[in-house]
Amino acid sequence: MSRLARWGVVVVAFVLAGALAGVLWEWLWDAPSGLTYQGKWYLEPAGPDVSFQGVALFVLIAFPLGLVLGALTGLARGREVSTVVVVLLAGAAAAVVMYAVGAGLGPADPQVLAAGQPDYTPLSSDLALTAPDPGLAPWRSTALVALPAGAMAGLVGTYLLGSRGLARRSRG
């Protein structure tokens, strides 16, 4: 298999796995609810454990997925330096796709919906990687690093602990 074909297979596999992980993320996530008041949405009950459960679930899915994908990619030896670059970029793309699919399947932004609602209207939170506060970009989070970090850990682990990584070499 040519080098470009191999890279293409790796990128497509990562992106497809990221899309499936986004579906899983949205499916497993339990949307916290909140109430509207004076055109704004407030999480009820408030607290970091409620507002960041979507972020924690993202990391719990993304890191092991990246670990497995990186390890599987590392099984094919040869061109290790270029493989590291491709896995890093494919992992980042997969994380973005995972977020886009999960957030796209989840409920709409409650801050936007709250503007036209009467006070004390219950609304579900949206699936985002930040707290549900007004003015925060929902995708600006270090949680997006979980999938590429897992992929790099799996790839490097395969390179270091693979059959040729720790093999004793003859000295004679």
Image (spheres, helix red, strand yellow):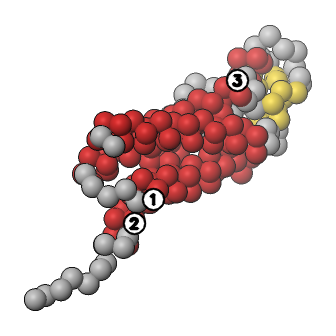
The kind of residue tagged 1 is Ala
Horizontal arrangement in the rendering, residue 137 relative to residue 166 (left or right) = right
Mark 3 vs 2, N-terminal side:
3
Horizontal arrangement in the rendering, residue 152 relative to residue 107 (left or right) = left
Residue assigned mark 1: 71
Distance, label 3 to label 2, CA atoms, is 39 Å
Few, some or many C-alpha atoms within 10 Å of disc 1 (few <14, some 14-19, many ≥20)?
A: many
Q: Is residue 120 visible?
A: yes
The kind of residue tagged 3 is Asp
Q: Quadrant of residue 10?
A: top left
Assess whether mark 2 and mark 1 are in contact (beta carbons under 8 angstroms): yes
Find residue 134 and report its horizontal and vertical position in percent: 63, 26
Q: Residue furthest left?
A: 172
Q: Nearer the viewer, residue 91 or 42?
A: 91
Give the mark toward the camera: 3 or 1: 1
Q: Residue furthest bottom?
A: 172
Q: Quadrant of residue 161?
A: bottom left
The kind of residue tagged 2 is Gly
Find residue 125 and report its horizontal and vertical position in percent: 75, 32
SS for dot 2: helix
Q: Which mark is residue 109?
A: 3
SS for dot 1: helix
